[in-house]
Image (tube, rainbow, N blue to C red):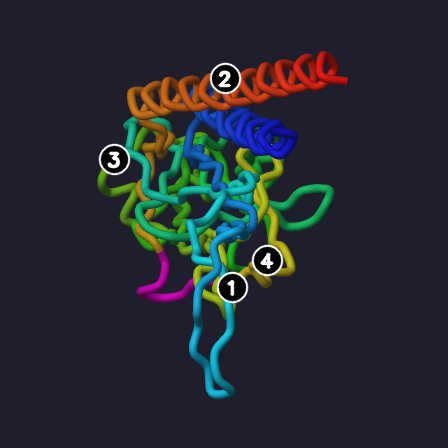
Amino acid sequence: MIRGWYTGASGMRAQQARLDSLANNLANVDTNAYKKDVSVQKSFAELLIRREDDGGVRLNPFGSSDEPPIIGKLGTGVETNELYTIFSQGAMRQTDNPYDIALDGEGFIAVQTPQGERYTRNGAFTLGLEGYLETKEGYPVLGTSGQPVKVQENNFQIDKAGNIYINNYYVQNPQEFIGDTENQWQDTVLLDSIKLVDFKSETGAGSRYIQKQGNSLYKATDVSGPATDLEGQERPRIVQGFVETSNVEPVTEMVQMIEVQRAYEANQKAVMNADSMLGVLINQVSRLA
């Protein structure tokens, strides 16, 4: 019965961890490019139960031996193994903002932070005071040249490959630029390309092992390995004027929350029943004594 307490309590702790991840997913359902987390559990070692008062005969190369028959296995509890991030593609939402970009495919955008290079899929960028393309938190977006991308309002375009073109007519005649006319945009110059990376560890998809840091940022870990620059056909398609939405399905998360609540209550009742049985046993023994 004491073991029943620990088994039920471990189930309650595991369901609590699962509930926390579901609640966090629902809280970020409207966060651009948010990737949902899934709490993965694993069971403790199982005990093999045998009948001690019922012998059995087992043949072996040295003769035979008595061995109690096997009744079955007894579980000893469960624990949270890991918090697994699902990197499935989110839907595209049109914003018509030239500073917004969305990734269609696997990969991450590199940005520069005070803690070093970090990675994101949230392409809701802004134009900083110094003309750099930045995240909402003010972290500049990096180009393949290794330098922050610097543009000016109304003078740049980003193609599907992530190449950034500036309007040379605007650069030379900023006072005469009257709009995005066809003739003016024929005179373009390649400025840089958005730096796109991915993680490819020896054990498989390294992006599975990168670590969330908040503000839609990720960092590399020892397990994920360093970021690898994507080139050519490996690069995901970039769509300007769109942002990627989260991959959280609110209905699915709510259904799973109901499942968690019922599983938690079942483990709670198991603990209460074990406590009640132990109380009855102690009271009966004390009477006999």
**Labels 1, 4: front one:** 1
Residue 257, above or below 85:
above
Say few, some or many: other residues with alpha carbon within 10 Å of mark 3 (under 14 / 14 to 19 / 20 or more): few
**Looking at the rendering, which quadrant does residue 226 occupy?**
bottom right
Mark 3: secondary structure: loop
**Labels 3, 4: front one:** 4
* Residue 249 picture location, percent across and down: 31, 26
**Labels 2, 1: front one:** 2
Residue at the extreme right of the image, as rendered: 289
Query: What amino acid type should be assigned to the residue bearing mark 3?
Result: Thr
Residue ID for mark 1: 228
Residue ID for mark 4: 146
Q: Quadrant of the C terminus?
A: top right
Query: What amino acid type should be assigned to the residue bearing mark 4?
Result: Gly
Q: CA distance from mark 3 to mark 4?
A: 32 Å
* Residue 202 picture location, percent across and down: 50, 70
**Looking at the rendering, which quadrant does residue 36 occupy?**
top left
**Labels 4, 2: front one:** 2
Residue 140, above or below 137:
below
Instruction: Please report the bounds of the magenta region as a residue range.
Output: 229-235
Residue ID for mark 3: 181
